[in-house]
Amino acid sequence: MPTTGAPRAAPSRIALVSFPGIRAFDVSVITEVWGVDRTDRGVPPFVLRRTAATTAPIPLRGGLSLAPDRTLSWLARADLIVVPGLDDHVTRAPEPVLDALRRAHARGTPIAALCGGAFTLAQAGLLDGRQAVTHWNLTDLLRTHHPAVTVVPDALFIHDGNLWTSAGTAAGIDLCLHLVRTVHGAEAAATIARAMVTAPFRTGTQAQFIEHPTPHTERDADTLAAVRAFALTRLAEPHTVGELAARAGMSPRSFARHFQASTGTTPLRWLITQRVAAAQKLLERTDLPLPEVARRTGFGSEITMRQHFATQVGTSPRDYRLAFHRTPARTGVDTPPPHP
């Protein structure tokens, strides 16, 4: 999926692959992200097509049904293909669906599978020798039925080549927003997230769930939230775990343990993620020089910012600006705070 170059003028074409047994929730997520016209709020136009072997209605669980509007041949025109999760993870998907996915993969079209949709990609043989993630409760089942797949046990979403897989339910939203962010920029993804009333950015490496939720008291939860808010409003300043722990009234070890238990990530990894997100917004919204963007977001130097961009965004700050800069320069704007 391209991350550099001028934004395309034509709408991005998204194919939802449907067949009996797909989950209605995932269909709704895909439709909410790519099937709603938000061009009046600066979101690029999308064309979402519901593809299937035939255009006959497809029954979904809960008394619902899906009306396909294109056959699987439309996948040849798609810029992105999305496979919903499944109600039954063992029964093989229809062979026309698997064949269409194999052909699309051979063409190099990006394919994303939500939750148990990883089983569909595995049935097509696309995940053999590749890394994949699925709902935490399905990891052993995926390993058992598809031993050639390297199952990552604890991540929200992951990609290997032109294939994306995600964990369960809410992680499908995270992956869809990430795919929007990758092609169209952080601002477009954040606009969609605001409309959906969901967090605009969770990294794929964040834990799927918290086994033992801590802190155990509301006071500790409020304290950690206050520390995150403090850091977000002062991203330009250097922060250490020791200093943040002191602000929370905890030892560094206790603070790091409570922070990871409550957020699914470490304090420093969380801070770097927030700095990258803030830098993305400045690169999109302003013409600030790259060293100034690095300074305002706490990276200290353009080199450090470039290194973290390469890791988290897959491109350089300069190329990101070339792809996603939209508005005239406003060099006096403050650093836009990311979502805590």
Image (cartoon, rainbow, N blue to C red):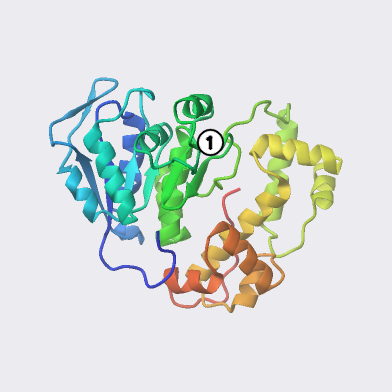
Number of numbered discs overlaid on the protein picture: 1
Task: Answer yes or no: is residue 35 visible.
Answer: no
The percent coordinates of residue 277 (x first, y second) are 56, 58
Nearest the eye: 137 or 100: 100
Task: Answer yes or no: is residue 48 visible.
Answer: yes
The image quadrant that residue 337 belongs to is bottom right
Residue at coordinates 22% horizontally, 42% vertically from top-left?
A: 50
According to the picture, the residue beneath numbered tag 1 turns out to be 151
Residue at coordinates 44% horizontally, 40% vertically from top-left?
A: 128
307 sits to left or right of 170? right
Residue type, numbered disc 1: Val
Residue at coordinates 72% horizontally, 47% vertically from top-left?
A: 267
Nearest the eye: 320 or 55: 55
Residue at coordinates 43% horizontally, 49% vertically from top-left?
A: 177
Nearest the eye: 214 or 21: 21
105 sits to left or right of 94? right
The percent coordinates of residue 194 (x first, y second) are 44, 48
Q: Is residue 11 above or below residue 256?
A: below
